[in-house]
Amino acid sequence: MGHKPMETPESYDLFLRRKYLLLLALLAILAAAVLFALTTGSSGMSLGQVVGTLLGRGTEQQEAILFRVRLPRTATAVVVGAALALSGCVMQNVLHNPLASASTLGVSQGASFGAALAIIVLDAGVQNAANAGTAITISSPGTVTLCAFAGGLATTAVILGLARLRGVSPATMILSGVALSSMFTGGTTLVQYFAADVQVATVVYWTFGDLGRPGWREIGMIAVVTAAALVFFLWNRWNYNALESGGATAKSLGVNVDLLSYASMAVCTLIAAMSVAFVGVISFIGLIAPHMVRRFTGSDYRFLIPGSALCGAILLLLGDLVSKSILSPIVLPIGAITSFLGAPVFLYMLFRGRDHL
């Protein structure tokens, strides 16, 4: 009498099918975006030529363009976009803050300071004046990554400390991230002030953000770490679902909340730091992608985690297409493009979908 009927197994199966169809749709969009990215450039290769070159039937010039320029850049956009989106997705859950991401909490800026320190003080990066296409070469990627991770981890420790204080609102946490960002930006400026002119130029160019900078070795490093992080996050998907209802509820269900929080934030910091170390600071991808997917999947981390990774890859790939198309053949800095495009989109989502945030 007036009671809502219980959900049947058939309706739950339909629910699951819709979520899996969404993931398949995102995968199809990503595949289409990758193919379109491979055909975009000043040389004007068609889709048929790209497919033929991938199958080994292209000319020597086409192979050089595809395998040395376009394919590495596209692969970088995919793995970095996925890494940043995964980081933002899990940070928002662990910190119970819908505005959390590596860029808004100062983690990216801390990693940027660590990487700049490695480039200038430890000579881990050099400038190639002879080749403008690869103006920066990271001579010691392990050193840069380690320093970037240390800088990001310092920020993460402060944020986790604030998260453990009672009464700290999400807005206060974001303001703390702004303060930390300013502090690390000031530190980077001081390091540049005492550096040689060539080193300053190296760091300034590096901070612009460039998807064409990493080689296959660096791309492989980011991909392996991001894949391992994805496995870790998916392994804990039910724990994140429990944590979504609050720390007390998660503890009552047997989740070790403290261990999960510390481990998850460390992994988030690592994948964000690796992206910053090789590409530069890229804002808003980790903030927007999880919210876009959440509007269709809800807060079920079985689907939100892989969906966020796919959406982040798509967004960064589309941003790269915009950066290459606006003033072609000039390629604009990807960090500036994601900031210009991401800020209005997020403001729109904030005011149109407040109930989802």
Image (spheres, rainbow, N blue to C red):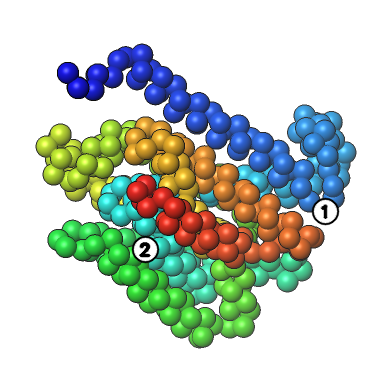
Residue type, numbered disc 1: Ser
Q: Secondary structure at mark 1?
A: loop
Image position, residue 310 (x, y; %): 52, 39
For disc 1, the neighbor class at 10 Å (few under 14, some 14 to 19, many from 20) is few
Q: Is residue 133 above or below residue 309?
A: below
Image position of 113 (left or right of 200): left
Say above or below: 316 vs 203. above
Residue 217 visible to an observer of this rendering:
no
Q: Residue at x 51, y 85 (%)?
A: 193
Q: Quadrant of the N terminus?
A: top left
Q: Position of residue 287 (x, y in %)?
A: 44, 54
Q: Are marks 2 and 1 in contact (CB under 8 Å)?
A: no
Q: Position of residue 351 (x, y in %)?
A: 42, 57
Label 2 or label 1, whichever comes before in sequence order = 1
Residue 42's disc is 1
Q: Quadrant of residue 243?
A: top left
Residue placed furthest toward the front: 1
- For the point 68% across and 52% down, the residue is 321
Binning the other alpha carbons within 10 Å of mark 2 as few (below 14), some (14 to 19) or many (20 upward) gives many
Looking at the rendered structure, the secondary structure element under dot 2 is loop
**Which mark is drawn over residue 105?**
2
Q: Amino acid at mark 2?
A: Leu
Above or below, 265 relative to 1 = below
Say which residue appears at 23% left-offset and 22% top-offset.
4
Identify the image quadrant of residue 164: bottom left
